[in-house]
Amino acid sequence: MESFDIQKDLENGLKNKEFQVYLQPKFDCRTEKMVGAEALVRRVTNGILVMPDSFISFYEQAGIITYLDNFVLEEVCKLLQKWQESGKYCYVSVNESAKHLSNKNHGIEVMKILNHYKVSPHFIELEVTESAIIHDMELAKKAEERMHELGFIISMDDFGVGYSSFSVLKNIPIDVLKIDKIFLEGLLNKRRFQIILESIIDMAHKLRMITVMEGVENKEEVEYLKEIGCDVLQGYYFDKPLPVQEFEKKYIYHS
Ligand code: C2E
Ligand code: CA
Ligand code: CA
């Protein structure tokens, strides 16, 4: 598709309310209590559920992902406001595309949305991938510092899959290290893999970062991650990304 068509496609999707936010809960590793959630976007076109991997990159390439990310952020703010009004507190993470980093007004635009819903940035975690950051480290450093100063929690998503993860850690103010699910592949049988993962968690703690393991799918992984002191877990073992109403029923308004 031409970038004009992609823009029209996104506009139509937003206008027709085809985009929906799903929430996947995250759990404290020790207590297994829900501590937060990640917002993951879906599109429902003609009754068919479309996953983000098949549209995000088109919008990114066309330079229009901000519209979708701001929509997701706004939906999350609406929920946080509603929950907080009934005394329920939970933090939610949103995925931040690389494109935001080059927009100097990003912080201002985002704060406008938060202020409108009277939501504090302390309840919002921004998940940024390494590939977004290494594209222009200086730009990313300034952008993340700005967001950090505003009070957002900064999380590095997909840690360990790229080539520059460690140089990113050296340069960017990161609060949360979200370790990529590839680290779980074959982990339980390979001591080498375990040493690497244990070292990453140890390093993250020494740097005062919270560690999150994504893609946790079975009890054995949970037990092992408990043993090595990982802080937060997310994955199908606990729950899949859920439509908002289902998430609320299960995790927010349960008795
Ligand atoms: P991500 O940020 O790494 O999100 C994690 C992906 O892993 C999600 O896929 C989630 O559904 C999936 N997942 C969760 N638990 C498990 C598990 O136990 N095992 C396995 N194998 N997978 C698990 P999803 O929802 O299809 O999202 C794919 C990617 O699309 C996300 O990867 C993120 O990069 C991007 N994305 C999703 N929503 C947004 C958004 O609102 N804005 C932007 N910019 N990107 C988004
Ligand atoms: Ca993510
Ligand atoms: Ca991830």
Image: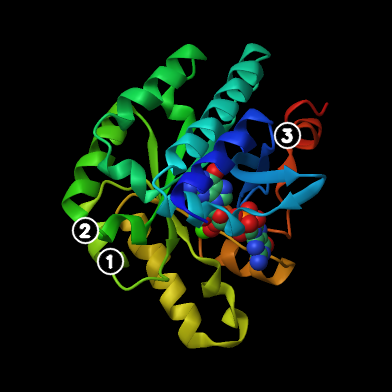
Residue 242 location in percent, x, y?
Answer: 74, 44
Q: Is residue 63 left or right of residue 54?
A: left
Within-10-Å neighbours for mark 1: few <14, some 14–19, many 20+: few
**Which quadrant of the view contains residue 104?**
top left
Q: Amino acid at mark 2?
A: Lys
> In this rendering, which labeled residue sits more in front, label 2 or label 3?
3
Q: Residue at x 33, y 63 (%)?
A: 203
Q: Quadrant of ligand 1?
A: bottom right
Q: Amino acid at mark 3?
A: Val
Residue 193 location in percent, x, y?
Answer: 49, 82
Q: Is residue 190 left or right of residue 176?
A: right
Residue 69 location in percent, x, y?
Answer: 49, 38
Q: Are marks 2 and 3 in contact (CB under 8 Å)?
A: no
Q: Amino acid at mark 1?
A: Phe
Within-10-Å neighbours for mark 2: few <14, some 14–19, many 20+: few
Residue 75 location in percent, x, y?
Answer: 59, 28
Residue that numbered label 2 is attached to: 170
Q: Residue at x 62, y 35 (%)?
A: 12
Q: Is residue 83 left or right of residue 6?
A: right
Q: Residue at x 49, y 56 (%)?
A: 57
Q: Are marks 2 and 1 in contact (CB under 8 Å)?
A: yes
Residue that numbered label 3 is attached to: 244
Give how far apart the Cα atoms at labels 2 and 3 are. Answer: 36 Å
Q: Secondary structure at mark 2?
A: helix
Name which of mark 2 and mark 3 comes first in the sequence.
2
